[in-house]
Image: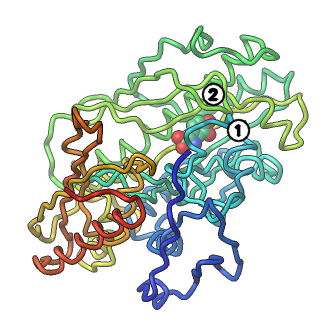
């Protein structure tokens, strides 16, 4: 098993001073007046706690909030209750068990997920709230938007916090006519769709749930896919309109929008798919979805006579494309030069306000045979000491010594601030702390 990532308690934490909404000691972490006793699962550093106060999706003048508002308004009047205020701390049951995650699913591991303790964690996806929404929603569908958290790499498109929008729809079984009517009611688009699975949703790799008929699966999945295509179309059409208004004449602006469906796997849906959007020469994965497993509906006290679909859209990558944001860290900057560029209801291209040089430093070491160092542990240590000045961390070299059998790794860290120049002295200091932390907590030997 993975080594416990030690709880790092920074005595002078800028977040504590700013918000005073959380407090960490070695025994417990208190957030919004609720205390979570620490145990061997605890692995949340203070800078992550700082992020949970930000709620970027509710800021109407922030790219994430603007995108959220756009999707909400395009889907208004279609029967979806809006939820966008769920607290990010959820139980293991909500995030994994209620959705049927296998016990050995990698998502449950401490190297991937931020735990307060063995029972409480920062949600890794908005699906964590599906059960309560299935129970509480009074409309045929619901939408949940929230910040979600995952331990991950450090680079321009990965950040430990990001945003998702979950959607779901439910029907009583036995009224297929209603589903047909609902499909007809979804506004038509001119999107070009590649979908080998539309008429044959069930394949060897993407099995049906036994209790469902093929007709039921076809209707539910057609409603799901047309809904997702509609959302994607509205968002990307809006982006094109804005680009044209701003005077752009790029070729992609006149081509019809293209999407394709690929098969996928999620523990709580079957069959499952992902939609990819062709945008400026690349396929962009943007939404996982599928026909909800009956067990999830049973867990939500809805009985065995319902049919349902669910999807989860990642907002940050889409917002990066729409607004021309080159680095995901920019969403979290407090710099006015970023924030003053965006306004409610407008999609405009970000104008970089400056480019400060990056400084690369390597950390090379022998791993300790007895202490496992997951690359996400190293990423976390860098983020803890460098904060948002860590632009990227890449494993550049790895080998095993032929005689001693010892394993060597070298990671290259690019320290680069988006808002100011970094001095050599401060980078040296941060880099030293990174090395010291690795030595103390993972018993590595610096080379
Ligand atoms: N929660 C999934 C993720 O984070 C996305 C997703 C996939 C949500 C399928 C869904 C779904 O509701 O049905 O990758």
Task: Say whether residue 188 is visible.
Answer: yes
Tell which circle, 1 or 2, labels the residue nearer the N-terminal end: 1
Q: Which residue is mark 1?
A: 169
Pinpoint residue 251: horizontal percent, then vertical percent.
16, 34
Circle 2: element type = helix
Question: Based on the displayed image, in which of its 4 quarters is residue 345 positioned?
Answer: bottom left
Q: Residues within 10 Å of mark 1 (few under 14, many from 20)?
A: many
Where ligand 1 lies, by quadrant? top right
Task: Say whether residue 58 is visible.
Answer: no
Give the colouring mode of the picture: rainbow
Residue 119, placed above or below residue 197: below
**Residue displayed at 13% across by 60% down:** 360
Label 1 to label 2, Cα distance in Å? 9 Å
In front of the other: 220 or 398:
398
Marks 1,2: beta carbons within 8 A: yes
**Residue displayed at 45% across by 51% down:** 371
Pinpoint residue 149: horizontal percent, then vertical percent.
51, 57
Instruction: Return the residue found at the far front.
Output: 403
Q: Which residue is mark 2?
A: 223
Q: In the picture provided, is 245 more to the left or to the right than 153?
A: left
Pinpoint residue 88: horizontal percent, then vertical percent.
61, 64
In front of the other: 266 or 363:
363
Residue 424, placed above or below residue 98: below
Q: Quadrant of the C terminus?
A: bottom left
**Residue displayed at 73% across by 26% down:** 179
The number of numbered badges drawn on the structure is 2
- The verdict on label 1 being within 8 Å of ligand 1 is no
**Residue displayed at 55% across by 50% down:** 165
Pinpoint residue 22: horizontal percent, then vertical percent.
58, 81
Q: Residues within 10 Å of mark 2 (few under 14, many from 20)?
A: many
């Amino acid at each position: 098993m993975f080594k416990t990532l030690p709880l790092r308690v920074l005595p002078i934490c800028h977040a504590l001073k700013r918000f005073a909404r959380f407090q960490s000691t070695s025994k417990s972490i208190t957030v919004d007046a609720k205390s979570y006793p620490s145990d061997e699962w605890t692995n949340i550093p203070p800078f992550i706690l700082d992020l949970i106060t930000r709620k970027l999706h509710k800021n109407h003048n922030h790219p994430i909030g603007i995108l959220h508002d756009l999707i909400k308004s395009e889907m208004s009047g279609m029967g979806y209750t809006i939820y966008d205020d769920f607290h990010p701390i959820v139980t293991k049951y909500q995030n994994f068990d209620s959705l049927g995650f296998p016990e050995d699913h990698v998502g449950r591991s401490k190297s991937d997920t931020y735990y307060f303790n063995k029972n409480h964690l920062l949600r890794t996806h908005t699906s964590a709230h599906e059960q309560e929404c299935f129970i509480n929603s009074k409309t045929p569908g619901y939408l949940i938007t929230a910040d979600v958290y995952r331990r991950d790499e450090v680079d321009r498109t990965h950040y430990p916090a990001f945003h998702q929008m979950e959607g779901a729809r439910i029907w009583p079984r036995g009224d297929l006519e209603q589903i047909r009517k609902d499909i007809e009611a979804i506004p038509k688009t001119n999107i070009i769709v590649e979908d080998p699975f539309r008429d044959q949703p069930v394949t060897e790799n993407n099995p049906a749930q036994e209790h469902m008929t093929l007709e039921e699966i076809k209707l539910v999945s057609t409603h799901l896919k047309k809904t997702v295509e509609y959302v994607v179309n509205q968002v990307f059409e809006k982006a094109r309109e804005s680009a044209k208004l701003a005077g752009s004449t790029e070729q992609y602006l006149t081509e019809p929008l293209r999407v394709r469906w690929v098969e996928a796997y999620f523990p709580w849906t079957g069959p499952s798919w992902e939609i990819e959007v062709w945008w400026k020469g690349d396929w962009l994965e943007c939404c996982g979805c599928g026909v909800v497993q009956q067990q999830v509906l049973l867990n939500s006290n809805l009985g065995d006579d319902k049919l349902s679909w669910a999807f989860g859209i990642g907002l940050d990558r889409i917002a990066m494309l729409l607004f021309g944001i080159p680095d995901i860290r920019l969403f979290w900057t407090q710099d006015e030069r970023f924030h003053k560029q965006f306004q409610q209801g407008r999609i405009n291209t970000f104008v970089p306000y400056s480019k400060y040089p990056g400084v690369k430093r390597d950390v090379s070491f022998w791993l300790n045979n007895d202490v496992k160092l997951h690359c996400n542990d190293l990423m976390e240590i860098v983020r803890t000491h460098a904060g948002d000045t860590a632009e990227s961390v890449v494993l550049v070299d790895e080998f095993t010594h032929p005689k001693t059998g010892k394993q060597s790794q070298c990671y290259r860290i690019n320290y680069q601030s988006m808002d100011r120049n970094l001095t050599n002295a401060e980078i040296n200091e941060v880099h030293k702390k990174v090395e010291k932390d690795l030595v103390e907590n993972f018993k590595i030997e610096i080379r």
